[in-house]
């Protein structure tokens, strides 16, 4: 069950008696790391909103951003790492389904899905053949699971990111994010209330899949992975689509008092959390629960994580209105209990009491642990990295190799499997801009969405890695013309009992919290996933940032390619190459030289905020016609991506902030964006107003190739060779052909 001796002793003390077998199972799932956050809670107090919520009325399913016009955006990210390692298709699919229901229970219509994925190497250069083959299998079936569920359920998958590193072999990371829209005066709650109000089971029947899924997610993967397949849920996207429509319709009746998804810990979590949040009791008769198999025990019914299920509390006497809606949509809807005023959740099966417990014992008394921290030796070693020890590589071949590395290469093979435009609100799709843009009905505003995280940065310097994730996600949405508004985070780490892992986690969270505070993009929701390790080792520390931005007018959004030939200008927050000349922790160092060393350069977060403001202002007033952020691979990769997207780029002058030619082209400093403008002088007003740097680079939109002048050298790459490297890499590794519509 995943409980230690001390936790069992605490249960005895709290109950003042021995727990029943069913009660013990309930404590086990509710006190798992996945549900109880027992190692992460002290560190998450760095987040201002989280700390306020923990000290106040508790956390709801996701936060809300007011976008005006009486509308709000709600968003959240969740991990489904271990299930995806064992059964990749269903693990990924049910991750998508679960996060959609989290958004739905806020009273919001899900309008967009995003994902962030990590896998071991798929190219075979650094790992044994059988490991690479397994990585490819996981990669292919995770993507298929996301596509299979998301496409059927009718929620567009509009953005994401995918990374590859040997440290993810055996333990892939699968993080699903969902975004919803709602009227601010129709926000729902998960807090049960009202003596005698009926408790209603909604959705699919309960089966024996997913039992102990929460505790499975709170332990390391091992050699018995196959034996844990029953811990993986089975999804039904068509049932979820019906559930979305029925739930939103039922909420409109006004008869629903509270509602919650049956996600991790299933019926246990929904009954216990709803009762605890409302400070009420609840009676539940498990004999009334729709079940796939008649012989299910109370333990199995309470701990099953079967999908497409929700629990609601309705107004007494109005339950018929809710039942009628769900029955009309062809879904199960059954009253299984009532709200009581005794502060106790009482569960019966076959007339016998199987559990009788104060819900607050399970939600508010979960033990909290704070591991010791230890700064690892590699971190000290990286501080002494000397860029001069890195030989200058050939610029031409290096760019082609970087463009073809799976970490940087086009993810078209992935996103072409996703329906990006269902609901017909997607205004900027994958491959054309730095973030997705939606134009929701009912408002002229636009919503920009992105999820970001650089695992290599976070490993080399966790604090800066956390900062980078926030500021890069903010730059990405600002590059479309959107003002960054709020953050949801997905925090993926190894075993928190290891001092170096807990140090990585603490530092990364502090970096995120500090950057989000300065950027005025509060962390409004999130997820923590620990124990991401297998017999092949622990994963890289991987904090992910989902960012939402708001555009005043959706029709003013821009992508990375301008509508006409323009001047190309680099907007920047820096005037030096930084501590390690932009080469430390870079893709260039890792991919070209096979070294992972040095620190990522520290972002100037105050200046990053001004850069985002300048982008928003310049795009809104028409000064900036296109924008593209510089990230992995630096200036060279960013320029090449524009060429592949459709227009030529001539870089005549490279900013003189580096000491080396390779750093000029591949250095990875934060706070840099290439923008297309009709005249160089037009950008000066933004530079003066926001105190940022501007470096004229050259031209964009003339011809179709990439030309770069560096010192006395002129290097040219054809669009064809860049496209072949960029678009062909991942399909080749997967034994697929490039899509015929790739230019």
Image (tube, rainbow, N blue to C red):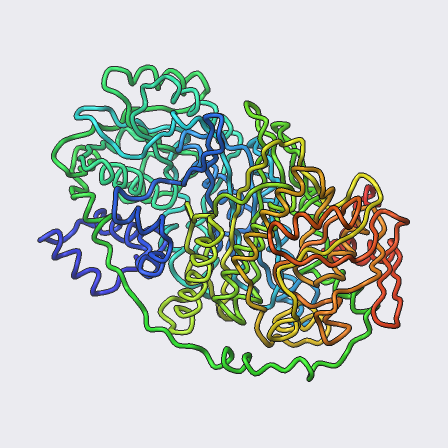
Classify residue 109 as left or right of residue 190. Answer: right
Residue 703: x and y, percent? 90, 49
Residue 59: x and y, percent? 32, 43
Residue 733 lies in quadrant: bottom right
Residue visible at 35% across and 35% down in the picture? 260
In the rendered image, which quarter contains the N terminus? bottom left
Question: Can residue 243 be seen?
Answer: no
Task: Answer above or below: position of 633 versus 303.
Answer: below
Task: Answer above or below: position of 625 versus 252.
Answer: below
Question: Can residue 613 be seen?
Answer: yes
Viewer-proximal residue, 141 or 573? Answer: 573
Viewer-proximal residue, 193 or 736? Answer: 193
Classify residue 342 as left or right of residue 51. Answer: left
The number of callouts visible is 0
Task: Answer above or below: position of 232 versus 111.
Answer: below
Viewer-proximal residue, 31 or 610? Answer: 610
**Which residue is situated farthest in the left direction here?**
16
Viewer-proximal residue, 133 or 251? Answer: 251
Classify residue 172 as left or right of residue 743. Answer: left
Residue 515: x and y, percent? 47, 57
In the rendered image, which quarter contains the C terminus? top right
Residue 176: x and y, percent? 52, 46
Residue visible at 57% across and 28% down in the picture? 440
């Amino acid at each position: 069950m995943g409980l230690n001796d001390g936790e069992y002793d605490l249960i005895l003390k709290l109950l003042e008696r021995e727990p029943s077998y069913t009660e013990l199972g309930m404590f086990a799932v509710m006190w798992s790391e996945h549900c109880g956050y027992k190692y992460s809670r002290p560190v998450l107090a760095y987040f201002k909103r989280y700390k306020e919520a923990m000290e106040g009325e508790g956390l709801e399913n996701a936060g809300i951003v007011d976008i005006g016009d009486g509308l709000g955006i709600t968003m959240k990210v969740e991990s489904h790492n271990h299930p995806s390692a064992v059964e990749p298709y269903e693990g990924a699919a049910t991750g998508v389904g679960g996060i959609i229901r989290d958004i739905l229970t806020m009273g919001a219509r899900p309008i967009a899905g995003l994902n962030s994925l990590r896998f071991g190497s798929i190219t075979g250069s650094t790992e044994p053949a059988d490991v690479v083959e397994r990585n490819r299998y996981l990669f292919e079936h995770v993507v298929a699971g996301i596509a299979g569920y998301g496409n059927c359920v009718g929620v567009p998958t509009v953005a994401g990111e995918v990374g590859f590193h040997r440290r993810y072999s055996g333990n892939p990371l699968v993080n699903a994010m969902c975004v919803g829209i709602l009227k601010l005066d129709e926000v729902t709650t998960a807090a049960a209330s009202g003596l005698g109000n009926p408790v209603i089971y909604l959705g699919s029947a309960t089966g024996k899949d997913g039992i102990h899924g929460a505790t499975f997610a709170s332990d390391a993967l091992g050699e018995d992975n196959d034996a844990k397949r029953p811990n993986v849920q089975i999804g039904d996207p068509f049932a979820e689509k019906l559930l979305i429509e029925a739930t939103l319709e039922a909420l409109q009746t006004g008869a629903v008092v509270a509602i919650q998804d049956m996600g991790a810990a299933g019926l246990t979590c929904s009954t216990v959390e709803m009762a605890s949040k409302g400070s009420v009791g609840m009676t539940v008769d498990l004999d009334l629960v729709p079940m796939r198999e008649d012989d299910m025990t109370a333990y199995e019914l309470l701990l099953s994580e079967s999908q497409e299920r929700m629990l609601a509390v309705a107004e007494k006497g109005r339950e018929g209105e809710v039942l009628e809606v769900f029955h009309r949509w062809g879904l199960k809807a059954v009253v299984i209990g009532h709200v009581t005023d005794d502060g106790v959740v009482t569960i019966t099966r076959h007339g016998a009491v199987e559990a009788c417990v104060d819900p607050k014992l399970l939600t508010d008394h979960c033990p909290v642990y704070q591991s010791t921290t230890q700064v690892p030796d590699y971190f000290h070693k990286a501080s002494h990295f000397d860029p001069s020890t890195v030989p200058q590589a050939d610029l031409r071949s290096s760019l082609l190799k970087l463009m073809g590395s799976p970490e940087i290469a086009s993810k078209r093979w992935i996103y072409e499997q996703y329906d990006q435009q269902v609901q017909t609100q997607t205004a900027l799709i994958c491959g054309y801009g730095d973030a997705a843009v939606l134009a929701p009905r009912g408002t002229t505003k636009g919503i920009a969405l992105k999820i970001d995280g650089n695992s290599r940065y976070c490993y080399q310097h966790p604090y800066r890695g956390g900062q980078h994730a926030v500021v890069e996600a903010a730059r990405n949405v600002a590059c479309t013309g959107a003002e960054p508004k709020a953050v949801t985070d997905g925090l993926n780490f190894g075993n928190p009992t290891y001092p170096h892992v807990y140090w990585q986690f603490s530092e990364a969270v502090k970096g995120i919290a500090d950057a989000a505070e300065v950027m005025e993009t509060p962390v409004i929701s999130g997820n923590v996933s620990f124990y991401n390790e297998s017999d092949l080792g622990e994963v890289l520390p991987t904090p992910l940032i989902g960012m939402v931005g708001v555009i005043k007018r959706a029709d003013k959004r821009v992508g990375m390619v301008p509508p006409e030939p323009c001047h190309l200008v680099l907007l920047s927050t820096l005037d030096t190459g930084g501590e390690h000349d932009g080469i430390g922790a870079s893709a260039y160092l890792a991919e070209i030289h096979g070294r992972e060393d040095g620190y990522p350069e520290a972002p100037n977060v105050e200046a990053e905020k001004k850069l985002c403001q300048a982008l928003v202002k310049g795009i809104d007033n028409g000064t900036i016609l296109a924008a593209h952020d510089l990230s992995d691979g630096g200036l060279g990769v960013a320029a090449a991506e524009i060429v592949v997207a459709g227009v030529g780029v001539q870089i005549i002058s490279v900013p003189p902030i580096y000491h080396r030619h390779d750093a000029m082209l591949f250095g990875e400093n934060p706070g840099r964006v290439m923008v297309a403008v009709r005249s160089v002088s037009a950008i000066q007003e933004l530079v003066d107003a926001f105190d940022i740097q501007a470096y004229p680079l050259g031209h964009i939109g003339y011809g179709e190739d990439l030309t770069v002048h560096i010192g006395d050298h002129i290097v040219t790459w054809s669009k064809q060779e860049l496209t072949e490297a960029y678009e062909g890499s991942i399909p080749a590794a997967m034994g697929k052909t490039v899509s015929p519509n790739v230019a």
